[in-house]
Image (cartoon, rainbow, N blue to C red):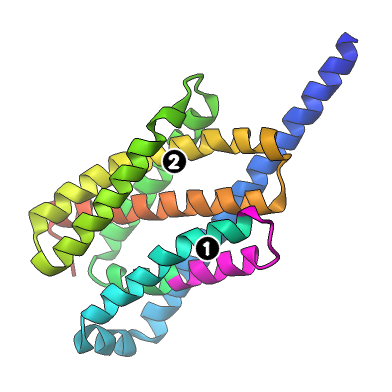
Amino acid sequence: MENNNNVIFDQKREGLNAFFSKVYGLMGVGVLVSALVSFISINFFLPNMIALMQANRFIFLLLWLIPLFAVVPMQVAAMKNSKMALPLFIFYSAFMGFLIAFTLLLYTATTITLAFGTATVMFIALSIYGRTTKRNLSGMHKALVAGVIGLIVIGLANFFIQSTPLMLFASVIGVIIFSGLIAYDNQKIEQVYNQTGGTDGWAISMAFSLYLDFLNLFLMLLRIFGIAGGNRN
């Protein structure tokens, strides 16, 4: 009986590790697609980007609202295990890469590299914490979601105010919020696996959540380093 229990435990652990690997792999694909699209946009379409930036800044507000409102439909498609979930995730990542390219134009290569490296190290550390901690992190989820909503409101307000101190404040708070979400979502992956058996749809859903966590953490750090270092282009 004990041997049977050990076999079941080992099979469950192997399945969980495979699910984690699938989630991280899909998330990595999303980040890679965004990075590739940003690179192509900046290196091959720079004149077009500059012309668009000079045309009307309200265009960017509308463009950034598209991925914001697309989050819920994307998650619903993934959780329903829809065949469209993966193509939608790739398309979403590509569109975000296009938008982020405009932000990257404002910063030096040094600042971008520092922000990405810091975000990567923080993501790995927080992922390990989320997977290994015995503390139940679900209690802070509502507060973190409320914080994200607050950041969106501040971002919309600052689009018109154009306050650097307000941007810095929001970015520091954003680092805290998305750090919490990275730990929470990593802990949630195991819960999702135990409840669903680790379907492909849920793997895409969790990868999408981690992708957004990492991307926003990177953008918040980019703003902080850019403001603190005074080395924006």
In the rendered image, the vertical position of residue 215 relative to residue 169, given as above or below: below
Q: Could you say where residue 59 lies in the image, as x and y percent from the top left?
A: 27, 81
Instruction: Determine whether the residue tagged by mark 2 lies in a helix, strand or loop.
Output: helix
> Percent x, y for residue 61?
27, 73
Indicate the quadrant where residue 229 lies: bottom left
For the point 28% across and 46% down, which residue is it?
174
| Residue drawn at x 65%, y 68% as measured from the top left | 84
Q: Which mark is residue 155?
A: none
C-alpha gap between disc 2 and disc 1: 21 Å
At a point 65% along the width and 44% down the height, the residue shown is: 21
Where, quadrant-wise, is the N terminus in this rendering?
Answer: top right
In which quarter of the view is residue 100 placed? bottom left
Residue at 9 percent of width and 65 percent of height: 161
Decide which of tag 2 and tag 1 comes sooner along the chain. 1
Region of the chain picked out in magenta, as a range: 79-95
Q: Is residue 42 above or below residue 75?
A: below
Is 232 left or right of 69, judged from the image as shown?
A: left
User: Quick one: SS at disc 1?
Assistant: helix
Residue 28 shown in magenta: no
Q: Amino acid at mark 2?
A: Ile
Magenta highlight: main SS = helix
Q: Position of residue 188 (x, y in %)?
A: 55, 36
- Residue 153 shows up from this direction: yes
Residue 229 visible from this viewpoint: no
Q: Position of residue 223 (x, y in %)?
A: 22, 56
Say what amino acid the circle numbered 1 marks: Pro
Foreground disc of the pair 2, 1: 1
- Quadrant into which the C terminus falls: bottom left
- 184 left or right of 17 in image: left
Q: Look at mark 1 in the image and give the residue it sits on.
A: 73
Provide the residue designation for mark 2: 182
